[in-house]
Image: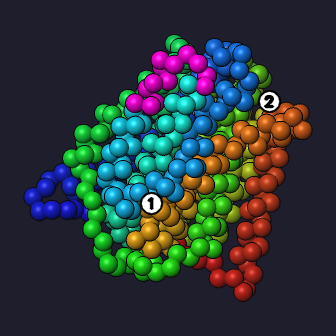
Amino acid sequence: MATHGAGNRWQTAPHLQAVLLIASTMTAMSGAMVAPALPGIGAHFAESSEVLVKLVLTMPALVIAVCSPAVGYVADRIGRKRVLLASLVLYGLAGCSGALIDHIAVLLASRALLGVAVAGLLSVTLALIGDYFEHNRRARLLGLQGSFMSLGGVIFLNLGGALAAWSWRGPFLGYVAALALLPYAWRVLYEPAPRGHDPDAAVPHAPTPLGRVLMAYAMGLLCMLLFYMVPAQLPFLLDRAYQSSPVAIGVAVSGATVTAAGASFAYPRIAARLTVASSYALAMFLVGAGFALVSVAGSYAATAVGVAASGLGFGLLVPNTTSWLMRIAPEAVRGRVFGGFSSTFFLGQFLSPLAIAPLTLWLASLRAVYMAAALLCCLLAAAILIAAAIPASRPTRH
């Protein structure tokens, strides 16, 4: 199912994929654009604490965590296309407003509105992938979505670094891209009709398997707690250790998104050979190895290599979780299930700097924090493999 309405040349699979993939990059853009500007924002708002400055990056995540279940419910009730189009409008207006704001509280409020928009974009794009596509094409598109989100992060991080070198306000201008996408999305998207039977998912009106859904949510939360150690913490480590420029910071942080894009693109082939549990274990090991290298690195180049290595793991974590949810979520509540996923996914983003702040004080350095995270990842990888090997357990295959 990838077309709708005879004679409508816009509502075809290539156009639908293009809209959904471009809209997906907006979720990565919400934080990536401003990450290289954090030191400049901190200098401008020197009277504010460092934690408040970091919340400029992660405030959208808190709002997404709070609003996503409600947004998913609304999308299921009034229409997913309507919610996605409204989200694009709000995203463009709220994002660009940051270039005009000169008070930290107002800036955080604008970032909160951006979070409402991202909640709609992520929840609805995931639900529409399930609505429009089936079987192998769906798995391939989920892998492409991860790649586009990662590659979008690369583009936006480096664009944000270049604009931040001009002014800390510059990166906020990039959010106008959502308004540019709006006419195309309005033309291409359509409201999906119930299929009645989805061969890749649960029975449309079957009870939601709450236990498995909550496990997937937990993995999404942990993934983003760890991933946001890169854009939220690494700029400060590089600035203090190597006096890196905003452009250099953007390049280093984007290393994780480059390798994540490659891993996400390869995900369908990996998923065909590994179980859900094995894919999670592999991903956690790669993140742990990369973070360990960041911890012990003695140069900018070695740090960048470690960040890139961790990206391989992050590139597997997201599509592994979304494809699992796609299969176990009944079609009728798919918007709500992915609204809940968006909530836990971005709650991890918001909590990341808040969780790392006391840990940094306790361990006395960001390098030690990265090593602690590396050990946690390796322990989790081992625990997942051990649990999967227990004869009584039957790991779900992709």
Q: Residue 298 has which mark?
A: 2
Q: Quadrant of the N terminus?
A: bottom left
Q: Residue 73 has which mark?
A: 1
Foreground pick, 261 / 10 = 10
Q: Residue at x 75, y 81 (%)?
A: 390
Foreground pick, 47 / 263 = 47
Q: Which quadrant of the structure image shows residue 178?
A: top left
> Neighbour class for label 1 at 10 Å: few (<14), some, many (≥20)?
many
Q: Main secondary structure of the magenta part?
A: helix
- Name the amino acid type tagged 1: Tyr
- Name the amino acid type tagged 2: Gly
**Magenta highlight on residue 95:** yes
- In the picture shown, does residue 178 fall above or below 106? below
Write down the region rendered in magenta. Answer: 93-105
Q: Is residue 223 visible?
A: yes
User: Which label lies toward us, 1 or 2?
Assistant: 1
Q: Earlier in the sequence, mark 1 or mark 2?
A: 1
- In the picture shown, does residue 212 fall above or below 321? below
Q: Label 1 to label 2, Cα distance in Å?
A: 49 Å
Q: Residue at x 54, y 59 (%)?
A: 340
**Rendered location of residue 38, percent (x, y):** 63, 24
Relative horizontal placement of residue 91, taking residue 66 as reference (left or right): left
Report the colour scheme.
Answer: rainbow
**Rendered location of residue 348, percent (x, y):** 65, 49
- Which secondary structure lies at badge 2? loop
Foreground pick, 101 / 314 = 101
Q: Which quadrant of the structure image shows residue 128?
A: bottom left
Q: Residue at x 45, y 42 (%)?
A: 117
**Rendered location of residue 315, percent (x, y):** 56, 51
Q: Is residue 248 visible?
A: no
**Rendered location of residue 307, percent (x, y):** 67, 39
